[in-house]
Amino acid sequence: MFDDVPHPGRLVASPMVRTQETAASVGRRLGLPVETDPALAEGDFGEWEGLTAAQIEDGWPGQLRRWHTDASFPMPGGESIEDVGRRVGAGLSRLLAGGADRTVVVVSHSVAIRAAIGVTLGAPSSA
């Protein structure tokens, strides 16, 4: 399907259960073991972990919207998008240091992936 992309030689995932399960399935298909890197974990939601948007709005009025629009604003007791970007960027840099002539499959999470795309593109955190 992607003839110009080398067959994956590494499979790296966040330590969280849902990504480990997905990565294990991918690994079976590719014949690769799953490596774990904490740098690829989802954003730390701090006091918001497990809450719905409505519950967050009730407890911290206006802060969820701010977190979505201000990348430097951390979740109470958690990370900002910029924090996640720095962490994930460091993990991606370590992978890149292993060589750019290979394919590495990374299994992660929505906030971490958004931050990784921003870091990779050099986009301003406000984007």
Image (cartoon, helix red, strand yellow):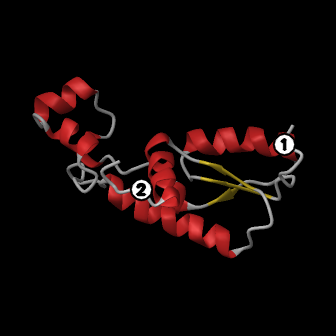
Residue at numbered disc 2: 123
Given the current orientation, which residue lies at the most extreme top position?
Answer: 54
The secondary structure type at the circle numbered 2 is loop
The secondary structure type at the circle numbered 1 is loop
* Three-letter code for the amino acid on which mark 1 is drawn: Phe
Q: Quadrant of residue 84?
A: bottom left
Residue at numbered disc 1: 2
* Three-letter code for the amino acid on which mark 2 is drawn: Ala
Q: Position of residue 74 (x, y in %)?
A: 24, 53
Residue drawn at 26 percent across, 27 percent down: 53
Q: Residues within 10 Å of mark 1 (few under 14, many from 20)?
A: few
Residue drawn at 83 percent across, 52 percent down: 5
Residue drawn at 22 percent across, 53 percent down: 73
Q: Residues within 10 Å of mark 2 (few under 14, many from 20)?
A: few
Vertical position of residue 4 compared to residue 37: above or below: above
- Asked whether the beta carbons under mark 2 and mark 1 sit within 8 Å of each other, the answer is no
Q: Quadrant of residue 62?
A: top left
Q: CA distance from mark 2 to mark 1?
A: 27 Å
Residue 98 tag number = none
82 relative position to 26: left or right: left
Q: Position of residue 113 (x, y in %)?
A: 51, 47
